[in-house]
Amino acid sequence: LLLGMPIKSGTTRTWPRCEWRRRGYDAIYVLRNLKQKDRPLIPVAQRSWPEDAAACLHAASTLLRKNPSDWEAMFVRARAAIACGFPHRAFADYARLLCNGLEADAETLTFAMGDMGRLLQEQRRTFSQFMPPTSAEKDVDSDSGAVMRPCIAKIKAGSLLFRDGMPSSALPRDGTGYTGPDSNTTDSRALPSARPVSRCLSRVDGSTVAGREEALATAAAHKPFVMSHAHTFGSGRGEPAWHGQFLAQQLGNLRCHVLSAPAATRRFTYYWGGDGDTVHNRYEAPSPVSSHACTFGEYMSYVQAANRRASGTPGLSSMALSCSLSDPAGNSLSRSIADSSVASNAPQVVYLQTALARTEPGASNISIQPIPGAALRAIVASLATGLKTATVSRNDLAVSNAELVGMVARAAEVGRWTRSALFVSQGGETSQVHYDHYDNIYLQICGFKRILLLHPLHASSLYPYPAHHPLDQRARVQLDDLPHEHELRGGGTFAEHFPRFTEAVMHEVLLGPGDLLFIPHHWWHHVETVKPTVAGDFVISLNLWFDFAPKLLSPHRPLSASFMLELSRHLEFYLGMHIDTKYFGAFFAMCIDELQAPNEPHAAARADAANAGSLPRSLLVLRNLVFAELATSWLGWRGLRPFFCDLLNPLRFDGLQHKSSSLL
């Protein structure tokens, strides 16, 4: 029996709950002072506090081992831990009380928040002693900064964490909360199933007023959709036919960006890292694709030679190309990557992904690339005009292609137009599952592409690479392995490597000529090009990327799912300033154990052992401050558990090769 707890024999209290709580704030009642049931609790004198507090701490811990959700014992143990000089343990118990709700009344929860506010002051002082500013923090705060990657620059300009310094109160701000991807509840995890769920993406008819109105409404809700009969460039009457010779004439001697990948995988992705990148250098680099600069005519020659070689006809075996890798925003990465497989004449496939318009580093306006061909240059110019002049209020069908793109952009309230890219391939290529920091309007011109989209909060099913990995923003799950799901290319099965993948919900679409696809920022997507029925034809797409950075500077509460995913990434980046990344999996497992302790006895046992001293005090204090910041600024206390379970799955870090670090 502890501080107002009911007699375990089943009888009810004979004293007011408010009385033991008020008196218990300054003095703990000790179980051994109760000699018979229904006897009023006897307050312990202030002078005997230390001894009685220790006894109370032990008694409460005993009861919690039997019933981890006993909120009254949890409350008493927190008070006793404060008296015994264990503030991080007290904070953990209060966090369990607030995160899981349990059956505590509002007065008790308010009481706990008041105590937590006082505990936070001490936790902040302890944090400054154990973890002074690191060199990584100095890099982030400096104007020069060694971090050059655009999305990291966004974190420098608008981190979602600790905007007002370390938290000083446990009271969440108005509007905080966490909502899962498929319901309005705080638990977004799908029911277990044998296979991931696949759904058809919402498709609207762009040839009707009603279809366009539905498309604009979906864009305004910031959800993906595909519009048929959008008459994208090259697919309508009077439009020039887009084929290899047309593009060769229009692009002329313009140097294009081409990726090459081993023919055995046909997988393409961007890759970060290098000597100038102080963020993505914590893990050993995977085997990357290589990047080249060449004219479209040279690209066609290589493709034709590769086709001849595949058919047994002697031809060009490799391509001497200069390396010049760029990311989707057109910013040069910290290094160029040479693919040894090209030098060794291993079979390669190539994928042209080149900018037609881009915002140069340091510039505020987008500029059209020096395209030699008048027809292609006019198309890109019309997009710029359409984005400026289009209005959502028009409900007639007499709008141009560019105006339709502008209407979708206005409805979705996208950010600044950052880049437009041309995608050309022969079919069979795949883009690794990833998300972008850009809203994407994707126009299919020739051929077909199969695209799978997943909600941002289904990250737990995709096992994303960590934020400090060269494949940041990409998933470890390869969806092109699904036809062979019983045996992965690297060995093993999906069930062995990715047990939570069956919880995924995928939205599938077959994108054809004349289709327009809207992909909101932070939505996971996997892209496959379908081989054309006519040999030698190309699959051609054109897109527009819009920056989301302005939204990051002033996000609304509650955070959208996209910003929840970004928040988890900011947390990893922040923790990387203080903890070696090889401990990330263990750290997040510790956090999840703490948050699940009232519901899972084994998690409670591990969490209690950690709070009792099995982990360094510095890590416990860091965990407590992170909990307080996330709960009070964005998630609310009850949102912490699903946030960590959905977006910070410890299994993401298993099997990755780490580099040495001087951090904890």
Image (tube, rainbow, N blue to C red):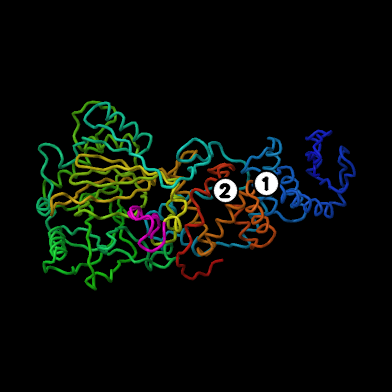
| Alpha-carbon span between mark 2 and mark 1 | 15 Å
User: Which x, y percent locates residue 47?
Assistant: 87, 51
- Residue 461 picture location, percent across and down: 44, 50
Where is residue 34, by image quadrant? top right
The residue where tag 1 is placed is 94
Residue located 39% across and 56% down the image:
486
Q: Name the residue under label 2.
A: 629
The circle on residue 657 is none
Depth order, front residue of 162/113: 113
- Mark 2 vs 1, N-terminal side: 1
Q: Are marks 2 and 1 in contact (CB under 8 Å)?
A: no
Using a 10 Å C-alpha cutoff, classify the residue at mark 1 as few (fewer than 14 neighbours), some (14 to 19) or many (20 or more).
Answer: many
Q: Is residue 489 magenta?
A: yes
The reply, left or right, for residue 54 in relation to residue 277 is right
Q: Could you classify mark 2 by the number of other residues whose Cα lies within 10 Å: few (under 14), some (14-19), or many (20 or more)?
A: many
Three-letter amino acid code at the position of disc 2: Glu
Q: Position of residue 166 (x, y in %)?
A: 58, 51
What residue lies at 56% left-to-right and 56% top-to-bottom? 589
Residue 360: x and y in percent read 28, 54
Q: In which quarter of the image is residue 108?
A: top right
| Range of magenta residues | 471-493
The local secondary structure at tag 2 comes to helix
Q: Nearer the viewer, residue 651 or 624?
A: 651
* Residue positioned 49% across, 57% down in the render: 651
Instruction: State the SS at label 1.
Output: helix
Q: Does the magenta stretch include residue 334?
A: no
Give the position of the N terminus as an image quadrant.
Answer: top right
Q: How many labels does the image show?
A: 2
Q: Residue at x 12, y 53 (%)?
A: 244
**Left or right: 264 as drawn, with respect to 141:** left
Picture quadrant where residue 507 is located? top left
In this rendering, position of residue 469 left or right of residue 331: right
